[in-house]
Image (spheres, rainbow, N blue to C red):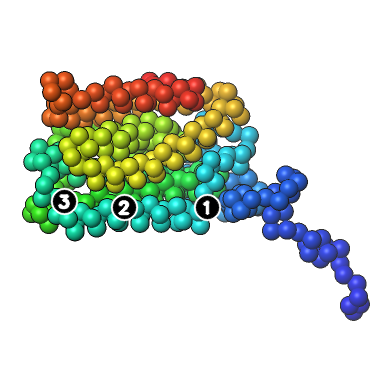
Amino acid sequence: MNRGHSCPWVTFMAQQKTYWHLLQQQRLPTEYEIVTSKLLCYTGEGFTGKRFELDVPLKDWYRQYQEGSPLVCSSWEKFRDPRETTYTKYTDVQREKEIFVDGILEEIELTGYDAHLHPAWLHIMAKVVAPFRYPCHGFQMIASYIGQMAPSGRITITAALQSADEMRRIQRIAYRIRQLQQIYPGFGADSKMLWQTDSMWQPLREVVEKLLVAYDWSESFVGLNLVLKPLVDELFMKCLSDLALVQDDYLLGQIFYSLNEDCRWHRQWTESLVQMVIQDNILNRDIIQAWINRWYPLAARAVHTITTFLEATLVTGKTPLPISESLAGFYRGYLQSMNLEAG
């Protein structure tokens, strides 16, 4: 055997970079590009260039609800998260936020803060804030499904991290409710019952449960990230936070401010994805708009019942707080930034 001779294919393989699939950019790729591109093995844009190797039942599910979705793109790999979030970057960002919220929660316990909250505001907290954990669980499950079914690894990553953000929100609200229970035994104990039976919550429960069985990945994405979640996030993380300040619960407002930073990123990456697919194929705009038209009436009714309760319960002088107007203006502006409109 001639040990001095090397086969051509061995030489070729030795010259390959770990980011060989990004060499067409003719520049050194970023960490984000390296760790997020061509991740999925079950799409035509993965490393193998194939879909499922075996004919298993799951293949039909992906064929119908991912590959067969009416929302199409010449290459889903063109999507970029505007924050370029990797797992490392995500943990660094969230660590700072968690330190901030931990400090607030510690201050609440050390100062006896909860003993001075107004009874009327405690009623709002028990009826509106405590049950909010349940729809947030629905948001987390839907985001996870979007990530599972997405046709690009970058979309999968952003949806998975959005799901993690939803779990963070659930945990922080649950911790806050437990703090209140230390001062007011039984506080929020009826949260599940309210979510399941109270008339104020039933429109939101209906739309969350319907989205949980919207199996087309892109319809699920539009229904959650373009319709229901922006409205609900703005209502709870912004409008309710502002109400907390009016009611002298400034620390809840600070916690919600931190949680709202997560929600803003969710809207940012959603906007980037929508703009990308519309630029890629103008027909995608009509498809997205049709889904907005389908889900918006349900979502609008869901937030209307909650805002009506808040406006009727908390008033400034003789004039109800203008939550509805603020919410409507915010949502119109958000859709207009993508050349879309409320249904």
At numbered mark 1, what does the secondary structure look like: helix, strand or loop? loop
Give the quadrant of residue 118: top left
Alpha carbon distance from label 3 to label 2: 15 Å
Name which of mark 1 and mark 3 comes first in the sequence.
1
Question: Could you tell me how far apart the alpha carbons at marks 1 and 3 are, in whole angstroms?
Answer: 37 Å
Query: Between 307 and 214, which is closer to the camera in this rendering?
Result: 307
- Which of the two discs, 2 and 1, sits closer to the camera? 2
The numbered dot on residue 213 is: none
- The disc labelled 2 sits on which kind of residue? Val
- Residue sitting at x 18%, y 40%: 248
- Element at label 2: helix
The 10 Å Cα crowd at callout 2, few under 14, some 14 to 19, many 20 or more, is many
Q: Distance of mark 2 from mark 1, alpha carbons?
A: 22 Å
Residue 315 appears in the figure: yes
Is residue 62 toward the left or the right of residue 200 in the image? right
Query: Which residue is under mark 1?
Result: 86
x then y, percent, for residue 301: 26, 26
Residue located beneath label 2 in the image = 101
Circle 3: residue type: Tyr
Q: Residue drawn at (10%, 50%), measured in percent from left and top?
A: 115
Instruction: Measuring from the top left, give residue 287's x and y in whole percent.
Output: 49, 25
Amino acid type, callout 1: Thr
Can residue 171 be seen here? The reply is no
Give the quarter of the figure containing the C terminus: top left
User: Quick one: 317 or 42, which is closer to the camera?
Assistant: 317
Residue 113 tag number: 3
Choose the circle earlier in sequence order: 2 or 1.
Answer: 1
